[in-house]
Structure formats: C-alpha cells, structure tokens
Image: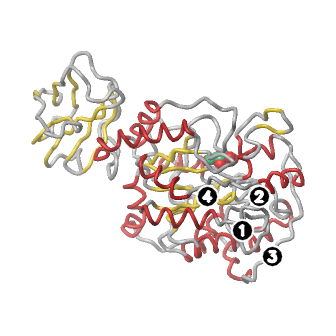
C-alpha cells in the first residue's frame, strides 16, 4: 500500500516544453555516441571498480522501530512497511537534526576503504530531499531544524578528497501527491525533472545519476529513454544506471537479449553477484553490509571483512563494479561495525589494489582456489583458499612469463614455475601472506589472454 499526500510545491518555473522529449516515440531518444566516445565516458567508472553507497534520510530516526514495535524489512521502507501516514512520518522528518554529521569524515573513511566514488540517496522513496530544492518544501532546509545542505557539503568533501560524487534519485515518491496515478506526468515534468536539473547543475561534478523505484506502473521504458537523453543533454559526460528505464533485470540478461535496448549505461544486480558476470555490458552489484540499506538499530547481522573482500574480488574478476552500502544513524554517524569493515578492506587494498583498480574480467573463469583479474601484460591470481599442495595451475599454454611473484612481497622475489602441456604450475610458499586473500602477479608478454 503506497501512501500519498498533498504537498504545497514551489512549482518550478522551468517550461514543460523542454520535457516533451519524455513522451515522443522512442527513436527520438537516441543519443549519438560512438563506441569509442562511450568508452571514454565510462573509463573512470570502469577503472574505479569499487564505490560506497550511502542510504541516509529520515528513516534513520525510527531505525526500524515504530510506536515501540520492530517493523520487518529494510529500514528505508519503514514508512511503507510500517503503514505510517504522511502526517505521522513528517513528525520524524521534523526531528531530523543530525548534529554529528561530518561530510569530510564520511569521505575520508570512503577514501581509506579504497572506494573511488560515493552514491548518496539525495531522495529515497519517502520523498524527503537532502538538499535545498527549489521545487519543494519537503527538504532539509525548509522542513527540519538542521538547515544545512547535506548534498552540497558531501559534494565539496568529495571534491577535496578526489572521490567521484554521485546521486541516487528515487522515481517513486510516497510524499508527493502526483507521484502516482493520473497526475504522474505533472510530478515528472514539474517536480522530478526540475529536481534532477538542479542536482546536475548546482552541486558540482556529478559522476553518476543512480535511479531507483523504476518498477511503478506509471514509469515506462520510453520515458526512461527520454529522461536518459535529457540528462545527457544537460551533462553529456554523466553516467546513468539502467533503472532510469525499466532495464534492471533486462540488463542482466542484456548480453543474451540484444533486441531489447534498455536505457542506461550499466546493469544493477542487487544483493547478488551474477554467477558468470554479465558478459558484454557494464554492471555493478550493490550489496548491503548487514540486511538493510537504511540504518536499523536492531540489525546486527554484519558480513565479515573476509566475505566483503571476497565479494570485491569475485565481482571484479567477473568484470563488474562493487557498490557497498553504509546506512548512517540519525545523528549522522556511520555505524562502527561498518567503519571497522571498511578500514579492513582499505588495509587489504593498500597492499593489493594493483590487482583491482583498472583491471578487467578473468580470461580463465574461476579456479577452485580463487579468482583472476587482468591488465595488459599482467595476470593476477587472487588466492582465496591457500592450496595444501603448495601450487596453483594456470590453464594457459600461451603464457610467455617474464616474472611471477607475490604482490605482497615488496622485493618481488620470483616464485618457481614449471611449464606443462596444460599451462603453467606456480609453486607457492607454505604460508599465505594474507589470511583473507593473497595475490600472485604473473607478468606475461604478448599473450592474447592478458590484454
Ligand atoms: O527499494 C529500494 C531499496 O530501498 C534500496 O534503495 C535498493 C538499493 O538498490 N533499491 C530498491 C530495491 O531494489
């Protein structure tokens, strides 16, 4: 059951004419871009490999508990799962005053973790805006005592630390009276689009617009294509996920479903890592650190740092990006268990980042002991389970190896190898340098598999 309310909007002065593109036939929505131009636009995102998702908003106040009772499901859905009427939910909004929020602290943690970009929920399904929106009073400046533009502060902190700043925007809006039913186009043209324009043009360099809530019946693929075109016209180098349209699952089947051309630049498998990746398209797995996106005071089921590092390696070995979520508290603090895990991931990346950033998918599938990533002239064997037999086998008879060594070994002491009819045996030391994952570097010349 979705909840609606009448919200007195500051109706945008932007003419609706600029949005007719949203309703004209699909062929009007084609962006002229060569494959090379697309590769240039996507390059920073592909090289980055690892981002931090931040789900933060009013829902952090109830934090999974409403009227003294726990509400099942993700914390950011409490307004819906808890069947909280708008008027009652607005009481939570009035309480939103995160005095301990420190954008620099959050961004420095992201940087220490090895994340290269941050995606923040500027507006989730509850409709509350974390920035000073010109078309709404339901925002941090007009509706709360906090009166600080969180999106602006985070954007500035990201610029300072050279972390790409990205925006999550929900097409669903449980607070806006026109966001479903007959008046949806009014919400789209007079509220949603002006908000996207202000986020894209007034908040610094936005790397990605990350849409969500695309599954509602009012939203269609042609509208998604029209919106994608509009956003690329506003900011030609912007990257947009496939939830701008209806492609969420389709993109995952995209490599097999060539005749279905979904809007958006990358697929968005959620809480999952596709077994074989998604060959032929860009994709990003978004995953929580416990079981909720938005903070819940009663969710303590934290994934281990070993599990998170293995997920990072698994995703990247399949050619994807890893968007790992944190759900800050109502006070504006990232939960300590999240901080601890992010710090551990950063320590592992301090040693092994060469085998992660700017790499591409494994040329050999998935060996029983771990995963592969590669760069031109280099193959990286990520050993997740140190083999008792003290060796690993690389199934490539073409490898012209110049050097093999443990990435953790600053002296790059060569490991002994043996050529076989099936490929290359690499002999390993008795002890793994890292109990979570250790990387063997195979410097290979002129090999078709290692480009
Ligand atoms: O409904 C949302 C959910 O709250 C969360 O934001 C996830 C993150 O990708 N997306 C939707 C569920 O698919």
Which of 128 and 449 lies nearest the eye of the viewer? Answer: 128
Assign a secondary structure to mark 3. loop
Q: Quadrant of residue 224 in the image?
A: bottom right
Nearest to N terminus: mark 3 or mark 2: 3
Asked if the residue under mark 2 is in contact with the one under mark 3, i.e. CB atoms within 8 Å, the reply is no
Pointer 2: what residue? 173
**Image location (x, y in percent) of residue 119:** 55, 56
Mark 4 lies within 8 Å of ligand 1 (Cβ measured)? yes
Instruction: Tell me the element at label 1.
Output: helix
- Residue depth check, mark 3 versus mark 1: number of the one nearer the observer: 3
Q: Are marks 4 and 3 in contact (CB under 8 Å)?
A: no
Q: CA distance from mark 3 to mark 2?
A: 16 Å
CA separation, marks 4 and 3? Answer: 22 Å
Question: Which residue does the numbered mark 4 point to in the structure image?
Answer: 168
Give the residue displayed 89% in from the left and 64% down from the top.
6
Q: Counting other residues with Cα less than 10 Å from the Cα at mark 4, is it few (<14), some (14-19), or many (20 or more)?
A: many
Q: Are marks 1 and 2 in contact (CB under 8 Å)?
A: yes
**Residue position marked by numbered label 1 in the rendering:** 192
Tell me which numbered mark, 4 or 3, is placed earlier along the sequence.
3
Residue 255 position in % (x across, y down): 47, 49
């Amino acid at each position: 059951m979705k909840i609606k309310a009448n919200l007195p909007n500051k109706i945008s002065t932007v003419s609706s004419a600029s949005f007719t593109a949203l309703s004209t036939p699909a062929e009007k929505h084609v962006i002229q871009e060569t494959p090379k131009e697309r590769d240039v636009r996507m390059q920073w995102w592909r090289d980055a490999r690892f981002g931090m998702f931040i789900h933060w908003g009013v829902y952090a106040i109830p934090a999974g508990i409403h009227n003294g009772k726990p509400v099942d499901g993700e914390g950011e859905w409490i307004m819906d799962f808890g069947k909280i009427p708008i008027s009652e939910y607005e009481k939570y909004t009035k309480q939103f005053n995160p005095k301990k929020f420190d954008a620099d602290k959050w961004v420095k943690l992201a940087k220490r973790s090895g994340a290269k970009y941050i995606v923040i929920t500027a507006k989730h399904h509850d409709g509350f805006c974390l920035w000073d929106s010109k078309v709404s009073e339901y925002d941090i400046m007009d509706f709360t005592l906090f009166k600080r533009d969180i999106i602006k502060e985070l954007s500035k902190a990201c610029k300072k630390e050279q972390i790409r700043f990205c925006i999550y925007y929900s097409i669903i809006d449980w607070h806006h009276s026109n966001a479903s039913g007959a008046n949806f186009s009014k919400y789209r043209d007079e509220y949603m689009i002006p908000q996207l324009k202000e986020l894209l043009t007034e908040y610094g360099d936005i790397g990605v617009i990350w849409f969500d809530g695309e599954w509602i019946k009012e939203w269609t693929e042609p509208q998604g294509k029209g919106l994608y075109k509009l956003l690329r016209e506003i900011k030609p180098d912007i990257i947009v996920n496939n939830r701008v349209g209806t492609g969420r699952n389709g993109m995952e089947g995209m490599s097999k479903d060539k005749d279905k051309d979904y809007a958006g630049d990358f697929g968005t498998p959620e809480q999952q890592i596709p077994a074989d990746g998604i060959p032929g398209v860009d994709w990003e797995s978004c995953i929580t650190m416990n079981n909720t996106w938005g903070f819940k005071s009663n969710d303590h089921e934290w994934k281990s740092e070993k599990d998170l590092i293995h997920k990072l390696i698994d995703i990247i070995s399949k050619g994807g990006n890893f968007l790992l979520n944190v759900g800050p508290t109502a006070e504006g603090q990232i939960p300590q268990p999240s901080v601890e895990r992010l710090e551990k991931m950063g320590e592992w990346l301090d040693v092994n980042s060469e085998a992660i950033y700017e790499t591409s998918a494994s040329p050999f599938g998935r060996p029983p002991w771990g995963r592969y990533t590669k760069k031109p002239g280099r193959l990286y064997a990520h050993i997740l389970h140190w083999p008792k037999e003290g060796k690993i086998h690389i199934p490539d008879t073409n490898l012209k190896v110049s050097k093999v060594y443990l990435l953790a070994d600053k002296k790059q002491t060569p490991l002994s190898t043996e050529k076989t009819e099936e490929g290359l045996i690499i002999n390993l030391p008795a002890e793994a340098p890292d109990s979570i994952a250790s990387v063997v570097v195979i410097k290979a010349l002129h090999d078709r598999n290692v480009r």
